[in-house]
């Protein structure tokens, strides 16, 4: 059966990266509901992220989004370090500039493509200052009507820009390409699926990997199949974890479909993808439109920990034996046993051993930090997508 201390070691070493933008205001096209106490600067976002790490012990890095987090990056890195936070993945933003309405790096206009490329180069410069390993590229590029542009020519333009960025990266830096089925493009997206991202990453080279955002697939997509295939090819670089009932809802990971999250993490465990050597970045990419931001991030981290613990408790020997015996129900039962295991006592015990409160959420709420920031953060411009 299980070596629980090995399971605990893996859980203790788990690293979940916070998205800076999850601490800012967010919403839908209908309304962005501002919340009291929301950060007004990257420094306040880091301070809030540090709370998540303080109470969970497994969230020591924050992904930045440029220009939303534009600042003195060397200073930010120092201040973050002082509160135990590392600056993580750098996310480029070529989806809000008016010039990019008909595309950024795929735009028919060469000058606009150049402008987009310059922003991507600027993000590489930011990585040099923050010490970040990963540049994550998500392109809102796409079309809304058949005939609007040449699908193949846009792929050529995309490949050209990606090659230029890849060339600019240092040997220690990686390009992470994120795909998305639709929105804001409603006819085509230029990187719509894992296959397109995979093809571009293969063409680029070993430091180009694919990012799976769990909210970016057609309903009913078997995401763990994509995970298994990309892991097998050594091309899975990162996850953007969130969950959804319908589209790119960006809800708390595991809240809509905890069984799917378990199945995804089981494929990661099977491929030893939690090991630091696998170099897979586990990031949250969420928007807390109606719920308090810091507790929502804490809950999300706990959801990932619970799904991971269940995945680590799968009796893989019994599973392999049942699979070899073509015992369909037996094999499924082995997996469901793990999934139906209540891992909360195990995680509480682990937190106790880490010197953490067994219940991070209760501990955070008891700390009163939430009301302190509401009282302190008066005036100034609250952070948000500014969309
Ligand atoms: C696009 C996306 C991408 C980010 C943005 C905040 O939907 O998932 O990862 O840049 O959200
Ligand atoms: Mn994402």
Image (tube, rainbow, N blue to C red):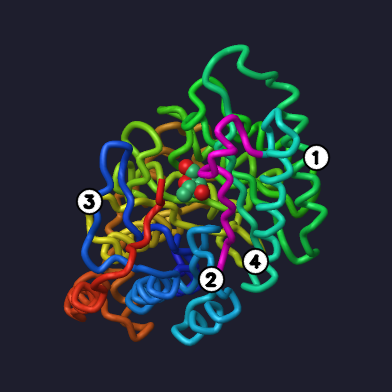
The answer to whether residue 266 of the structure is visible from this angle is no
Label at residue 126: 4
316 lies above or below 87: above
Q: Which residues are magenta?
A: 87-104
- Which-is-in-front pick, marks 3 and 2? 2
Task: Indicate if the residue with disc 1 has its beta carbon within 8 Å of ligand 1.
Answer: no
Left or right, residue 115 beside residue 288: right
Label at residue 131: none
Label at residue 203: 1
Residue 371: x, y in percent? 18, 75
On the image, numbered disc 2 is attached to which residue?
71
Residue 23: x, y in percent? 35, 62
Which sits earlier in the primary sequence, circle 3 or circle 4?
Answer: 4
Crowding at dot 4, Cα within 10 Å, few <14 / some 14-19 / many 20+, comes out as many
Taking the magenta stretch, the answer to whether it contains residue 212 is no
- Which-is-in-front pick, marks 3 and 1? 3
Residue lying at 59% horizontally and 29% vertically, measured from the top left: 102
């Amino acid at each position: 059966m299980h070596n629980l201390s090995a399971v605990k070691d893996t859980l203790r070493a788990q690293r979940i990266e916070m998205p800076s933008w999850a601490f800012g205001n967010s919403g839908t096209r209908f309304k962005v509901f501002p919340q009291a106490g929301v950060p007004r600067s990257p420094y306040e976002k880091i301070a809030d992220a540090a709370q998540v790490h303080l109470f969970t012990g497994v969230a020591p890095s924050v992904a930045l989004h440029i220009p939303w987090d534009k600042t003195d990056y060397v200073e930010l890195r120092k201040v973050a370090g002082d509160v135990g936070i590392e600056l993580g993945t750098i996310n480029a933003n070529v989806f809000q500039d008016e010039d990019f309405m008909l595309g950024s790096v795929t735009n028919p206009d060469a000058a606009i493509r150049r402008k987009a490329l310059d922003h991507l180069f600027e993000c590489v410069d930011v990585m040099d200052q923050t010490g970040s390993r990963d540049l994550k590229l998500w392109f809102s590029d796409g079309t809304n009507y058949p005939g609007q542009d040449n699908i193949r020519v846009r792929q050529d333009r995309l490949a050209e820009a990606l090659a230029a960025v890849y060339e600019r990266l240092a040997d220690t830096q990686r390009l992470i390409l994120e795909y998305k089925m639709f929105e804001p493009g409603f006819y085509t997206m230029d990187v719509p699926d894992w296959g397109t991202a995979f093809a571009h990453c293969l063409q680029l080279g070993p430091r180009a990997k694919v990012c799976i955002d769990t909210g970016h697939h057609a309903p009913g997509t078997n995401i763990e199949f994509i995970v298994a295939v990309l892991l097998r090819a050594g091309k899975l670089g990162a996850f953007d974890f969130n969950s959804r009932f319908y589209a790119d809802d960006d809800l708390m990971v595991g809240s809509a479909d905890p069984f799917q999250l378990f199945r995804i993490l089981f494929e990661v465990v099977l491929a030893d993808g939690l090991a630091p050597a696998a170099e897979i970045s586990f990031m949250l990419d969420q928007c807390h439109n109606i719920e308090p931001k810091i507790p929502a991030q804490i809950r999300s981290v706990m959801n990932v920990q619970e799904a991971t613990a269940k995945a680590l408790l799968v009796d893989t020997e019994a599973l392999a034996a049942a699979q070899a015996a073509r015992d369909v129900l037996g094999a499924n039962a082995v997996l469901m046993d793990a999934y139906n295991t209540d891992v909360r006592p195990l995680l509480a015990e682990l937190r106790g051993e880490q010197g953490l409160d067994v219940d991070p959420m209760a501990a955070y709420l008891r700390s009163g930090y939430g009301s302190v920031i509401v009282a302190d953060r008066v005036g100034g411009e609250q952070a948000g997508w500014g969309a």
